[in-house]
Amino acid sequence: MEQKLLQMAEEAKKVLEEAKSLEEINEVRIRYLGKKGELTRILRGMGALPPDRRPRVGQVANEVREVIEATIAARTAAVKERIKQARLLAEKIDLTLPGTNFSLGHFHPLTLVQRQIEDIFLGLGFEIAEGPEVELDYYNFEALNIPKDHPARDMQDTFFIGEEVVLRTHTSPVQVRTMERMAGRIPVKVIAPGKVYRRDDDATHSPMFHQVEGLAIDTRITFGDLKGVLQTFAAEMFGTSTRTRFRPSFFPFTEPSAEMDISCVMCGGRGCRVCSYSGWLEILGCGSVHPQVLEMSGYNSEEVTGFAFGMGIERITMLKYGIDDLRLFFDNDLRFLEQF
Ligand code: PHE
C-alpha cells in the first residue's frame, strides 16, 4: 500500500511537470485530490485495512497529499509567471514613441470678447445682470417708452411668440427688470450681456446675435459720466490710442441719445476701406435714461438720473479681429474657429 502511494506521488509530480496550462493543473488536482480522485479513494478505503497498519498508511497518504498539493502550488505559480511574461513580451511597449495627442477645445471668439467686455466693466464697478430671451412685450417695448405703433415693433424686426410675448430684440429689457428688482435703490451699475433676436439675415445681420447692455443710476449722474466710462472701455478694448466721438441720435428710452464712434482700428483714423474713408467706426448706442423710463420702473426722475448703452458683441469682435463676414461666427467651420 505504501509503495502504491509513493508511486502515485511520483506519477503526479511527473504529470504536473508537463502541465502547461492552469486548466491542465486543475485536471491533475481533480484526478488525485478530487472527490473521486485516486488519493481520496485510498483514504476512504482505509477502513478495510487491518488496524495495525492504518496509522502508517494514513501517515504516508497525508505526506503524499502534501507533496501533491505543494507541487500543484509551485506549478501554478510557474505557469502564471510564464503567462505574464508572454503577455509582457507580446505587448512590445516602446516608451520612446510620442504619446497619443488629443486636442483641447477652446472658447468661441464671441465668448472671449464677451468675457473681456465683462472684465472691463467689472473693473469699473459694474455687476452682471441677466434677463430672459423670451420676453414680455412690456419689458422689450412698453416700459422702454416704445409705444404700440413704433416701427421697432414691426413684423420685419421682431419675432413674435404670442400677442404679448416676443424674442427680445435687444438687451434693454434687462434695464427695466434691473430697476424693478432694485425697487428704487441706488446706485444701480449693471451690464447685461446676452442673445437677442431680429428678423434679419445677411453678411452683416444674423437672426440671433449678442449685445451687452449697460445701465447706471444714481444722484448726479451726467452725460459726462457716460462718456468717461465708454472712453475707458474703448481704450481697454481697442488700445489706449483709441479716440471716441459721440454723434446725436435717437432712442425712445434715452434723452439725449447718441451713437458712439471709435477711431478706425484698421487705419487709426486716416481713412480706409473698413471705415469707408471716414476714419470712424460706429460701435454702440447710448444716452441719458429717459425720465419716463425711470418713472415707469419706480424711480423718481426729479431725484436720480442715469445713463445707458448697448453694443453688439459680434460687431466689436469683427473689428477687434478684422473679420469681415458675420456668418463665420455661426458656421462652425473649425478652420475659422481654430484661429482664436
Ligand atoms: N437697445 C438699443 C439697440 O438695440 C441700444 C441702446 C441701449 C441705446 C441703451 C441706448 C441705450 O440698438
Image (cartoon, rainbow, N blue to C red):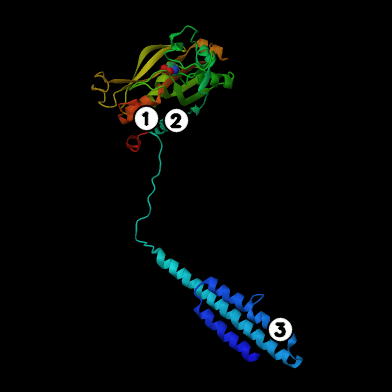
Helix, strand or loop at label 2? It is helix
Label 3 neighbourhood size at 10 Å, few (<14), some (14-19), many (20+)?
Answer: few
Q: Nearer the viewer, residue 183 or 152?
A: 152
Q: What amino acid is found at the position of numbered circle 2 in the picture?
A: Glu
Q: What amino acid is found at the position of numbered circle 3 in the picture?
A: Gly
Q: Which mark lies nearer to you, 1 or 3?
A: 3
Helix, strand or loop at label 1? It is helix
Q: Position of residue 243 (x, y in %)?
A: 32, 23
Q: Position of residue 316 (x, y in %)?
A: 36, 26
In the picture, measured across the screen, residue 82 lies left or right of residue 276, that is: right
Question: Is residue 102 positioned above or below 175 on the image?
Answer: below
State the image quarter where residue 279 is shown: top left
Question: Is residue 221 positioned above or below 114 on the image?
Answer: above
Question: For mark 1, what is the residue?
Answer: 329
In the picture, measured across the screen, residue 96 lies left or right of residue 305, that is: left
Residue drawn 62% across and 85% down?
Answer: 64
Question: Is residue 304 positioned above or below 8 on the image?
Answer: above
Q: Quadrant of the image for the N terminus?
A: bottom right
Q: What amino acid is found at the position of numbered circle 1 in the picture?
A: Phe
Is residue 286 visible in the rendered image? The answer is no
Q: Badges 3 and 2: C-beta atoms under 8 Å apart?
A: no
Question: Distance from label 1 to label 2 (Cα)?
Answer: 20 Å
Q: Nearer the viewer, residue 50 or 141?
A: 50
Question: Distance from label 1 to label 3 (Cα)?
Answer: 89 Å
State the image quarter where residue 104 is shown: top left
Question: For mark 3, what is the residue?
Answer: 45
Question: For mark 2, what is the residue?
Answer: 118
